[in-house]
Image (cartoon, grey):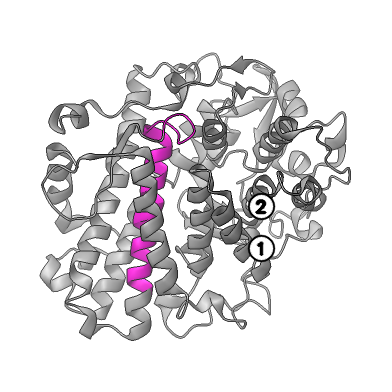
Amino acid sequence: MSVLLCTVVFASCSKWLDVKPQSQVAAEQLFGSQTGFEEALNGVYTRCSQPGQYGNELTFGFPDVLAQNYSIPALDYQLYLQTSIYNYSDINFISRKDTVWTGLYNAIADCNLILANIEKGKKLLSTVDYAIIKGETLGMRGYLHLDLLRLFAPSYLSNPDAPAIPYVTDFTDKVTPLSTVSGTLALIIRDLDSAKSLLKPVDPILSASYVVGYASDHSNTEQNNPALFLQSRRTRLNYYAVCGTLARAYLYMNDQADALSNALEVIHSNKFPWTNTADFISANPQTIDRVLYKELLFCWYIPTMGLDMETRFQDITGSYIGGAGGANLYETGGVGGGDLRYKEWFQPITDVSGSRLNVVKFSRDADTNLAPLVAPALRLSEMYYIAAECTYDADPGRATAYVDSVRFHRGIGTAMTAVNKQDFLTQLVKEARKEFYGEGQIFYMYKRLGMPIVAPSGLSYPAGNGIFVLPLPNNEIEFGNR
């Protein structure tokens, strides 16, 4: 961590608990009770859910611009045009990616502060709280470093020995050296494995009696735990979310055996049911589930971002996809003719900008909704895609069957066919792009596989570090001696 970054972190230590003003107290007071540890961890989630991080930009913003998912209006109201052409010297892009860097490392510093205090505070915690807090905190540290790696360093495929990012494990003002790509991944996996071991004996989500669902479901038990801290596990880095993150990390370093093992653990848990078609296509805006809520392993809780989502996606100044591009992306003239995602996530509009598709995937009813407003972080479908990729070499039929499972639940009855491995990967990316539209994930898939980015219009951008590796912040280079 650079000197400047540490200055930012330490200057904000007394105010980083955004969740409650009364929690803005000195560390020694904060970690003097079980409630203090719980609120400290809640503060990490609150920080990560801010608009400059996963609450907006990292989920709905520039990673999907880089993946060419959005059409940019000629007047460039949201200041993404230069980002869409990979001008990484643009001041608006620099501001956004530097905010991500600083925000995620500040959240990592928060994690490290908790971990620095949890052993001496162990006597204050119940056995369950100790394991949950330490497990989630280690898991979060791994999760955040993985996204920093996927943004700011070469891919493992490109150069596993390249200098990557600092993997910060101490709450300190000392500069943390850069780890290599492979070294960073090893540390990520170490933290995630530790988190998995801690959470497995205690996480309520593992209980057979824990049933995910909408608030209106009689079977839903997500809010039933008498301890508020142990409710709503899918808005926290729960055991299965750690498994999903491990599957991502192992696949990123091309360890397909361990990636498959973790993905299958999620799939075989049967904890996350596929969304009922009736809920996906409901004509009632109060009962429709466009975000496929039950399938989310992990999500960021962003209840106040509804108006921002409307502005981002449904205003004439917002992000959209051209009509022809959307039809091409979802293959509406062929196998995608019945794709429910295309029908439910996009609204045809004709205005001064021409024919366009407004993104209504995250739109809300003003009053009552089946589920809270969340930013998706990990989906069941991603586990199927990982399983498919890791299975293809040994069993192509089984691999395509995993993909077909997702396609079937999205209204596509035609089976996937692939003539060889490269054709399979091309089609897999196409399928994932349909699934993760507006969720900030597909850019990482192009990067991991070293594949050119193909816009819905058909325009292709060649793979390479000039596109895939975001520059470190200037202050990090200067003060961190990078």
Please give the residue where the numbered disc 2 appears in the rendered image.
Answer: 387
Q: Tell me if residue 120 is in the magenta stretch.
A: no
Whether residue 150 is in magenta: the answer is yes
Q: Quadrant of the N terminus?
A: top left
**Disc 2 residue crowd, few under 14, some 14–19, many 20+, Cα 10 Å:** many
Which mark identifies residue 199? none
**Residue 266 screen position, x and y as percent:** 61, 64
Q: Quadrant of residue 32?
A: bottom left
The kind of secondary structure the magenta stretch mainly shows is helix
Residue shown at the point (21%, 68%) measured from the top left: 22
Discs 1/2, front:
2
- State if disc 2 and disc 1 touch (CB < 8 Å): yes
Q: Amino acid at mark 2?
A: Ala
Q: Is residue 401 left or right of residue 70?
A: right
Res 267 label: 1
In the image, residue 6 sits, relative to residue 379, either above or below, namely: above
Question: Label 1 amino acid?
Answer: Ile
Residue nearer the viewer, 13 or 51: 13
Q: Secondary structure at mark 2?
A: helix
Crowding around mark 1 (Cα neighbors within 10 Å: few <14, some 14 to 19, many 20+) is some
